[in-house]
Image (spheres, rainbow, N blue to C red):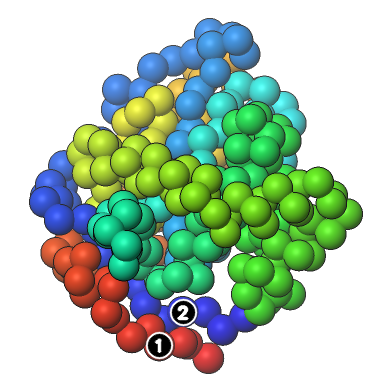
Amino acid sequence: MKLLSILCGIAVLGLASAGSGVSKHANIRKHNDKHNKINVALYYESLCPFCVRFISNTLKPVYDDETLRQYVNFQMIPSGNAKVGEDGDGAKTVFCQHGEAECLGNKMHVCTMEYFQQESDKFMPYLFCYDGALNSKQAHSIQDAFKQCTGDHAELHEFVKTCANGDQGTQLLLKATAATNELSPPHEHVPWVTIDGKHAPDAEEGGLKEVVCSSLGNSVAPLSCLATNIDTTLLKSGTSSKRNFSPNESLESIKNREYSEEQ
């Protein structure tokens, strides 16, 4: 797939300063058993190259660790730097940073979650499949990835297709956008990760498993946490794999921007 060259670090109007996030594992509560799960929330965009790589390379390995997954609730909120405005008929709608194709992709994600009634063990494998097809370039578009991943599940395929192309998908995406806009502090880039509602910047730098294991505590953390191979020097140095850009892009700019593609 030709990855979009437009970058994903442009955030919503009225950002807090870049230093306002919660650092390291501060204020992340300890968990005593698997019934008191950690809430890991990812705020992202379906066509953001940084998000695509994060989901495949950082989030999926944590989810695939069955001994660790039993302690985690996964929440996926696809909207990112989208803006709410009105369509040609005056109805409220969403304008996505990477254009209409990304809005369709975001809707496919939220509609898949809706089909599975927000049960992460059921919808996460499909989201990973969509993302993995794009990340590996086995799919050339979000529609192609959707077809590849739902081809053997006709009912899901028809539900998501109808949902994403109708008002239901728009309403679900509006809810995801509202949830993103309620973040405190406001998000400054995507991907944006929170642990139990608190921003966890180290999780975005490749240290998601370390942050999750740390919040569990030594008495509960599974053995796989002992084998976590994280470059703590990189995490502590503040070296970033994401990029931060101007926070003040307007709705009109998003609606009118011409998107270029990276070969």
The answer to the question of whether label 1 and label 2 lie on touching residues, with beta carbons closer than 8 A, is yes
In the image shown, does 242 or 147 lie closer to the viewer?
147
How far apart, in angstroms, are the residues tagged by discs 1 and 2?
7 Å
Tell me which label, 1 or 2, sits earlier in the chain: 2
Per the image, label 1 sits on a secondary structure element best described as loop
Residue at which label 2 appears: 4
Residue most toward the bottom? 263
Residue most toward the right? 152
Classify 10 Å Cα crowding around label 1: few (below 14), some (14-19), many (20 and above): few
Query: Residue drawn at (40%, 88%), measured in percent from left and top?
Result: 260
Residue 16 location in percent, x, y? 12, 47
| Amino acid type assigned to the residue bearing label 2 in the image | Leu
Query: Residue drawn at (39%, 40%), measured in percent from left and top?
Result: 175
Say left or right for 161 vs 152: left
| Amino acid type assigned to the residue bearing label 1 in the image | Ser
In the image shown, does 29 or 237 lie closer to the viewer?
29
Residue 259 location in percent, x, y? 38, 83
Q: Residue 260: which numbered mark, if any?
A: 1
Query: Residue drawn at (31%, 52%), measured in percent from left and top?
Result: 92
Specify whether residue 207 is in view: no
Residue 217 location in percent, x, y? 50, 18
Q: Quadrant of residue 139?
A: bottom right
Q: Quadrant of residue 137?
A: bottom right
Query: Residue drawn at (67%, 23%), measured in percent from left and top?
Result: 70
The N terminus - image quarter: bottom right
Would you place residue 197 above or below residue 9 in this image? above
Specify whether residue 13 is in view: yes
Classify 10 Å Cα crowding around label 2: few (below 14), some (14-19), many (20 and above): some
Say left or right for 254 vs 190: left
Would you place residue 101 above or below residue 161 in this image? below
Q: How many marks?
A: 2
